[in-house]
Amino acid sequence: MTVLDGILAGVREDLEERKRQTPLAELRSRVADMPPALDPLPAFRLPRVSIIAEVKRKSPSKGELADIPDPAWLASQYAAGGATAISVLTEGRRFGGSLADLDAVRSQVDVPLLRKDFIVDPYQLWEARAHGADLALLMVVSLTDVQLAEMLGVCAELGLTALVESHTAEEVERAADSGAELFGINARDLTTLNVDRSVFAKLAPLIPEGAVRVAESGISGPQDVAEYRKCGADVVLVGEALVRSGDPRTAVREFAEGANGSAARS
């Protein structure tokens, strides 16, 4: 069993419990009363790098990252620093997140929110929208082609923007065949947790022209964001480096300015 297999097993167990507590019909009713989801793609397509700043307490590879007693405050600092969108980890066992974190962040900021989780069931997309998410992560490695198509169909129904994540050339091809518009390239192999930042440079050219490219993982400072930008990233998702920075508002601004300044000078 890989690391990812273990995570997905726990995700499915917790999902069944939530389904018992909150029927899909209740989620549908909540979604029907909500305003439309925010569309992040116009901002992501601007001629500068965008930052998705992440609310992340811990990870399987690094353990505890930061004590985050008030995720809404952290998100407000990210937004004030210029984050284009905010990612909220909602997986509980390995990442210490929850849908309550998503609720808290939604109540505080008006930028697009990404539900970052291991989505294996359309129910989770209804959950994401019902709790205020505008985007949802879909990992190609954990979905069949049929499942990916189904998930993208539900996202379209809900107005959610799907961040379709790949780690290999074969996964990028599958994401492209699905019609994805927002491609994530994760430098971390979730089956082993190993990080190889060169993965983005290798895979970015395989992404169809006109799609938005998001670089994920392996980011410790503004220089890494700048490097990803030079390799073609439109958006960079940053978690650990921001939650450990001590000054998230300034850190977000420095990450964006460092990359966009480098691009302007090159």
Image: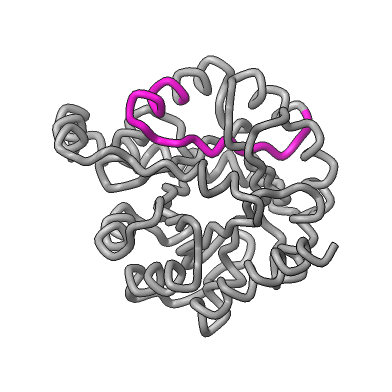
Instruction: Compare residues 237 and 250 and report the one nearer the observer.
Output: 250
In the rendered image, which quarter is residue 257 located in? bottom right
In magenta segment, residue 94: no
Kindly give the residue lying farthest to the bottom in the view shown. 246
Residue 165 vertical placement versus 177 (above, below): below
Q: How is the image coloured?
A: one colour
Q: Is residue 77 left or right of residue 238?
A: left
Q: Residue at x 66, y 42 (%)?
A: 213
Q: Is residue 147 above or below residue 138?
A: above
Image quarter of the C terminus: bottom right
The one nearer the camera, 207 or 12, is: 207
Extreme-top residue of the structure: 146
Q: Position of residue 10 (x, y in %)?
A: 44, 44
Image coordinates for residue 43, horizontal then vertical, percent: 52, 49
Q: Residue at x 71, y 65 (%)?
A: 259
Front residue (pair 182, 60): 182
Q: Is residue 35 left or right of residue 203?
A: left
On the image, the x and y values in percent for residue 1 come to: 64, 39
Residue 50 lies in quadrant: bottom right
- Residue 200 relative to residue 63: left or right: right
Q: Quadrant of residue 109?
A: bottom left
Residue at image point 32% right, 68% down: 72
- Against 54, residue 164 (above or below) is above
- The part of the chain drawn in magenta is 152-169
Q: Position of residue 7 (x, y in %)?
A: 52, 45
Is residue 219 found left or right of 86 in the rendered image?
right
